[in-house]
Image (cartoon, helix red, strand yellow):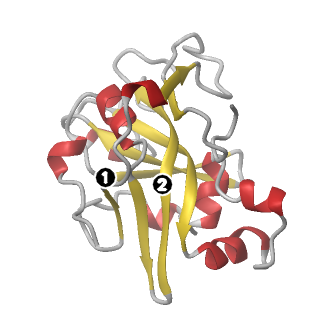
Amino acid sequence: MQKKLPLSFYRRDVHTVARELLGKIFIKKEKNGILSGMIVEVEAYDGRIDRAAHSYNGKTKRNEVMFLGGGLLYVYFTYGMHYCANVVTGGEGEGCAVLIRAVEPVEGIDAMALNRYGKTNLNGREKLNLTNGPAKFCKAFDIDKNYNGLLLTEDIIFIVEGDNLKPGEIAASKRIGIKKSADLEWRYFIKNNRYVSRL
């Protein structure tokens, strides 16, 4: 297995990390095997200037993980029913993170299907919809609040090198489903990848 990304990877500018996470492989080790997927879509959040970031109004019990420095997983509950997972970036106190919006499934697809749909025999549409959204990704990978604050250099959840993308393969657009700071083009995704949530 390839080497995990070091803490130094995460402790950089949120936009640099966001773009460089594309093509990397997100891995979760479970008792019965490994779940993995290539990160194909992300969104950057910078609480210092970004009114859409959970950290914009300062540290709270909910968002404190965002202020602990890059290399942690920040998991939050939203709309009373979904979990979303973020990679914390930058230095301590910055309040920056990258939301993982979509991954392309690589390993453990049957387990992901059971988590999402309660079955393994998926049709083509269900396969494409397996992990193409932040809540779908968390459901498929069975990620909830128990993983909030997890260090990404440990052996439970971590990220390793994957495809080396060329700058021309990465696109940027406005983020999805937010009202504040909605004009910022801080969503990054791999062009023409079928697992991106919205092309």
Tally of marks: 2
Residue at the image position 58 percent from the left and 59 percent from the top: 138
Label 2: which residue?
A: 38
User: Seen from this angle, which residue lies furthest left?
Assistant: 8
Q: Quadrant of the N terminus?
A: bottom left
Residue 113 image position (x, y, % from top left): 70, 72
Q: Is residue 2 left or right of residue 21?
A: left
Give the amino acid type for the residue marked by disc 2 in the picture: Met
- From mark 1 to mark 2, how far is it between C-alphas? 18 Å
Q: Is residue 36 left or right of residue 162?
A: right
Residue 31 image position (x, y, % from top left): 46, 88
Residue 182 image position (x, y, % from top left): 60, 15
Mark 2 secondary-structure assignment: strand
Residue at the image position 68 percent from the left and 73 percent from the top: 115
Q: Is residue 86 visible?
A: yes
Foreground tag (1 vs 2): 2
Residue 77 image position (x, y, % from top left): 59, 51
Mark 1 secondary-structure assignment: loop
Residue count near mark 2 (Cα–Cα under 10 Å), binned few <14, some 14–19, many ≥20 = many
Find residue 44 and report its image quarter: top left
Front residue of 80/176: it is 176
Label 1: which residue?
A: 72
Residue at the image position 72 percent from the left and 67 percent from the top: 116
Give the amino acid type for the residue marked by disc 1 in the picture: Leu
Q: Is residue 151 left or right of residue 73?
A: left
Residue count near mark 1 (Cα–Cα under 10 Å), binned few <14, some 14–19, many ≥20 = many
